[in-house]
Amino acid sequence: MATRILIVDDEDRIREIIRGYLESDGFDVTEARDGADALRTAKRWQPDLIVLDVMMPEIDGIEVLRQLRTTSNVPVILLTARAEEVDTLIGLSVGADDYMTKPFSPRELVARIKTVLRRADRSAAFDASDRLTFAGLVIDLGARELFRDGEPVVISTLEFDLLVALAQAPGRVLTRRQLLEKVWGFDFFGDERVVDVHIRSIRQKLGDNADDPELIGTVRGVGYKFLGAPA
C-alpha cells in the first residue's frame, strides 16, 4: 500500500505542485483547502504524514496541529512564510516534526517528507519488549509510547526520538549538532534552535522544571544531558 500524504493549503496552485511531485514519487495523495477540512480528512483518511500550511483562514495551521495532537502522533511538516518565525516556533512546540519556509523547493519538500517518514518507522528496529526504564519514567521503544508516573504522555514522533537519543546516553552531554544528526539526520540544515524548542516542549509534557530539572539538564553553550535515574 502506498504511503498516504495529506496536503493542507488554501492555495490551489501550491497543492497542485506538491501533489504532482509526490504522486510522481509513488505517494498516495489527497488534499484539504482549509483547517476544518483538514481535521475531517485526517480523521477519515488516516494519512501517514501531513503537509500543513500555517496561514489559513478561520482555523489556521497551528490550531489544526494543536487539535491533531490531542488524538494523533501523525508526522506533520509545516509550511510557513519567512516572516512567521514566531508561528513556526509555536508550531514546533505543539508537535510539528519539521518545517519549510515559502517559497520552497518541491524536491526538497519530498526529501524532507522521506526523512520524517524514516524517523516515524524506526519502531520496527525494536522488539515489543524493548524499554528504557527510569524512576517515574518509562519509554516503550517498540510501541513508541511514553509514561510518566504510570500515566501516558502524548508526544510527537520527533520529540519521542529526541528523548530516546538523550535517554540512551544518560549523563552524557550531547551537543545540539549531535542531537540534530541523531534525530533529524546528517542532511539537516537549518537553525539549531529547533532543538531548544523541542526540549522545552518535552519538559513541559513531562512536568520537568527547566530551572531544577530531574530528567533533562541544560549544559549552557553546549547542549543537553539526560539526568533520569535508572529504576
Image (cartoon, helix red, strand yellow):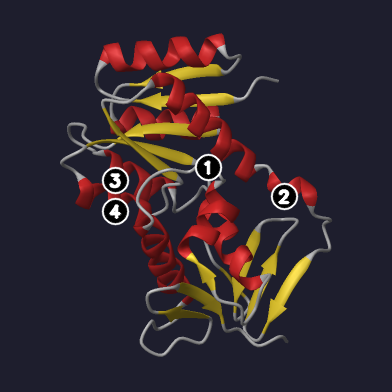
What is the three-letter code of the residue carrying label 3?
Answer: Ile
> Which element carries disc 3, helix, strand or loop?
helix
Q: Nearer the viewer, residue 51 or 110?
A: 110
List the residue tagged with mark 3.
Answer: 62
The earlier-in-sequence mark between 2 and 3 is 3
Residue 79 in sight here: yes
- In the image, residue 120 sits, relative to residue 27, either above or below, namely below
What is the three-letter code of the residue carrying label 4?
Answer: Leu
- Give the residue displayed 80% in from the left and 64% down from the top: 130
> Which element carries disc 2, helix, strand or loop?
helix
List the residue tagged with mark 2.
Answer: 123
Location of residue 152 in the rendering, given as x and y in whole percent from the top left corner: 58, 68
- In the image, residue 181 sits, relative to residue 24, either above or below, namely below
Q: CA distance from mark 1 to mark 2?
A: 14 Å
Q: Residue 145 sits in which quadrant?
A: bottom right
Label 1 crowd (10 A; few <14 / some 14-19 / many >=20):
many
Q: CA distance from mark 4 to mark 3?
A: 10 Å
Location of residue 73 in the rendering, given as x and y in whole percent from the top left corner: 53, 48
Q: Nearer the viewer, residue 152 or 17?
A: 17
List the residue tagged with mark 4.
Answer: 89
Location of residue 225 in the rendering, given as x and y in whole percent from the top left corner: 54, 77
List the residue tagged with mark 1.
Answer: 74
Q: Are marks 2 and 3 in contact (CB under 8 Å)?
A: no
The earlier-in-sequence mark between 4 and 3 is 3
The earlier-in-sequence mark between 1 and 2 is 1
The earlier-in-sequence mark between 1 and 4 is 1
What is the three-letter code of the residue carrying label 2?
Answer: Ser
Horizontal relation, residue 67 to residue 114: left or right: left
What is the three-letter code of the residue carrying label 1?
Answer: Val
